[in-house]
Image (cartoon, rainbow, N blue to C red):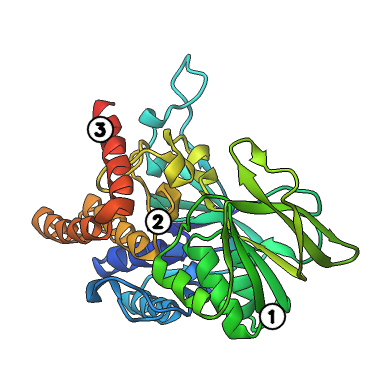
Amino acid sequence: MRKMKADIVVIGAGAAGLCAARQAASAGADVLLVDENKLPGGQLFKQIHKFFGSREHNAGMRGYKIGRRLLEQVEKCGARVLLDSLVYGLFPSRPAETGATETSAAEISASDISLGLIHRERSYSLEAKKIILAAGARENYLAFPGSTLPGVMGAGAAQTLINLHRVLPGRRVVMIGSGNVGLIVAYQLLQAGAEVAAILEAAPKIGGYGVHAAKLRRAGVPIITSHTVSRAFGGEELREVEVAALGEKGIVPGTERIIKADTLCLAVGLSPMTELAWMCGCKFVYIPSFGGHVPLHSEDMETTVKGVYAAGDITGVEEAATAMEEGNLAGLAAARSLGFLSAAEAERRKREVRERLDNLRSGHFGQVRRESKERQLAVMEAK
C-alpha cells in the first residue's frame, strides 16, 4: 500500500476544513486537505443568498463567493488539496498494552493513527502528526408511505441541483420544514422557476429567521404550521402529497388533504457525520439540539484523543460562520501544538476567534449552543 505523510491532515473541505487548513498552512505546517467531492467548499458553493451578521462574518457576501475566497487563500498558503478522495477509516497503529483488550482513547494520539485513503482508485496509508475532522453533517430523512418515490428528496439535494448543476428538480414543490434550510431552499426554488405549493412545519411556529419567511409570504407561498406529510402518491414519479394537521397525539384524523406536487423536499434537520471520530476512539456526548451524538472537545477543539481535533457541524450543527470560526480555532491550535506558532501569538489569535464565536452565539438561539458547549468543556475538565 502506498504511503502519504503530512504534519496536519484536514478531513473535509467545507467551511470549517478550509479555514482550518488556511490557518495551519499559513503558520508553516505541511497541510493535506482531503475531500470526497469533486469540488471543495462544502455547502458554501450551494449558497447563493447573502450572509447576515457583521462584516467580519462576511455579512452581505453570498456563500459561493465566500467559498471561492477561502479556497484561494488555502491555495496561496501552500496547502495540498486532494479532491475526489475518500478517507474510509482511522485505525490505531500502535498495539494495545499487554493484557488490554483494546487501546483506549486516552492511550493513543493522532500520531498513533493511520488513515485509510482512496485517491484516484488507489489505496494509500496516510500518516499525520495532527488530524482535524471537519466532515460536516448529513440530511435527516422522514419515513412515510410513498417516501421512496422519485421526486422525494432532501432539501440539500434540491439545492445542489438548482445552484450547482442548474437543473430544476420539479415544477410544483412541497417543502417539509420551516427552518432556515427549508425557507432558503424554498425561495431559491422560486427563483429557479418552480412553484412552491406549500411549506409544512410540524411545530406550532416557524423555525427559521423571520426575514426568510417574510420573503416567501410576500411571494404568496403558504407556510402551514402544526402540519406534516402523511402519505405520498404516484407511480413512476410523485404526483400527490397528503398532508394532515398534528395534535398532541400525532396526526389528527379527518384533517387530511391532498396537494398536487411532483417534488417533495425534506428539510427536517441534519445529523453530524461522526463515523471517523467514533473509529479513532473519541468520547461522545448526546446533545439533541446539536443533532445527536457529538465528540467531546476542549476550547481548542481538541477531542479526547490527543492531537485529533473536530470543527464545524461534526461538533454540533450550526451556521456556516460558526463552522468557519471553529475551523480557525482547530487550525491555530494544531499549528501551535507542533511549534509553528509561538504561545503568545497563538493565544492572541485564538482569543480573537473566541470573541467572534461569542458574538455569533449571542441571543436566544446562540445561548442554547453556547451553554451546550460550556457543558462539553466542563465534562472535558472533569475527565
Which residue is located at x 41 percent, y 31 percent? 105
Disc 1 marks which residue?
A: 168
Which residue is located at x 47 percent, y 69 percent? 213
Q: Amino acid at mark 2?
A: Glu
Disc 2 marks which residue?
A: 318
> Marks 3 and 1: which is nearer the front?
1
- Residue situated furthest left in the rendering: 344
x and y, in percent, of residue 221 in the image: 58, 74
**What secondary structure is found at the residue carrying circle 1?**
loop
How crowded pointer 3 is (Cα within 10 Å; few <14, some 14-19, many 20+) is rated as few
Disc 3 marks which residue?
A: 378
- Residue situated furthest right in the rendering: 235
Q: Amino acid at mark 1?
A: Leu
Above-or-below relation of 38 to 2: below
x and y, in percent, of residue 40 in the image: 50, 72
x and y, in percent, of residue 275 in the image: 54, 44
Q: Earlier in the sequence, mark 2 or mark 1?
A: 1
195 horizontally vs 108: left or right: right
How far apart are the alpha carbons under marks 3 and 1?
47 Å
